[in-house]
Image (cartoon, rainbow, N blue to C red):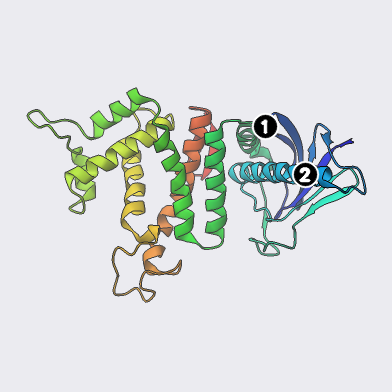
Amino acid sequence: MKAIIKIVILAEKSNLDENLAVVVGKDWWDIRIKATQLLVTSRIEYEVPAPGWSGKDDMELDGKLHRHIDRVVAHIRNTVYISFGVTLKWGYEAWYGQTHAVNTLDLYPSIHQNGMSTTFDIDTLEVQRTIFNDVGSTKNTTALTMMGYWRRAKELSELSFHAEAYLNYFKVLECFESLQENEPVRKALIDRFAPKIEGSKDRVPMKTIRRHAGTAFSDGALVKHIVKAATIAASANFSSKMSSRFFIYILDLIHVRNHYNVAHHLLRVVKEDWFIGVGQHSDEFERVIPDLSNMKTVSKMMILSYLHEGKYKYNGRDHRWELR
């Protein structure tokens, strides 16, 4: 038999009242966001076991449906987090036909406290809706992977696992590095920020970068980081004319990743650090916090630029996303 699949995901309280949709594979799912829940409904009917089912074939079909529902829920979570930012509970309920197929609400702890709420300015939600539609409808597998890392980072940050959150945001940058796209832009950025000096076979960092880095890094180490940053920026569809200040900030994010203890490898012990560099409460880890919010914004900016070059911009003064 065939039936519609319905899913309920609980969320923190908000004044959202939205009818939206996402695509998973080739199938669309309608989403109603209101008050403290998301009601998700498939647009097509799926082959499901009949009521009172039993037997190997029905078990295999039920397992297949569970895996697909998990995939749908994961994509919706990623999309809601990166667009509206409201916190969703980890568990959910699902039904197909008359069968109560999934109920994991009590299996996972809530990552938000009772009483949490978000109030949106309804008149300025168009940008968030547009982001939802853009990321919710993408079939780009690399973008889907990066959205998963981004959502996981946000959840870890809300749980105060700051270093782990930073690592997951940084995984977004590493995804861009692995793409190695837009070679002309990449080359232009490297030539600009690590030019070749006449009479020398090696590149040298731009003077502004050299001064910013101080004596902590050799020219060779800085050039490696410049090449890494240029590869990331080019793959994210950034312009070769991007500001030097923003490029240097990407370098700073790389330096934090490589030279603080965010990789769970103790590089140094600060004598004032009572936790000896171990655990998320370490003073060494706490140095990541000032960069965490900016890392969240920069990684989201890269994902949106990768999917829709030049469509979005971030207003740092008012802390909001805008359409260009």
Q: Is residue 152 above or below residue 228?
A: below
Q: Measured from the top left, where is residue 216 in percent x and y?
A: 21, 54
Q: Which residue is mark 1?
A: 25
| Residue positioned most to the top | 184
Categorize mark 1 by other alpha carbons within 10 Å: few (<14), some (14-19), many (20+).
Answer: few
* The furthest residue to the left: 199
Q: Which quadrant of the figure contains the N terminus?
A: top right
Q: Rate crowding at label 2 as few (under 14), some (14 to 19) or many (20 or more) other CA atoms within 10 Å.
A: few
Residue 317 makes an appearance in the image:
no
Q: Position of residue 184 (x, y in %)?
A: 33, 23
* 195 horizontally vs 227: left or right: left
How far across and how far down the image is residue 44, in percent?
81, 31
Q: CA distance from mark 1 to mark 2?
A: 20 Å
Residue 122: quarter of image = top right
Total numbered circles: 2
Q: Earlier in the sequence, mark 1 or mark 2?
A: 1
The residue nearer to you, when weighing 212 against 274, is: 274
* 76 left or right, relative to 185: right
Nearer to the camera, 64 or 204: 64
Q: Secondary structure at mark 1?
A: loop
Amino acid type, residue under disc 2 in the picture: Glu
Q: Secondary structure at mark 2?
A: helix
Residue drawn 39% across the image and 57% down it: 263
Residue picked out by circle 2: 60
Q: Residue furthest front?
A: 56
Q: Label 1 is placed on what type of residue?
A: Gly
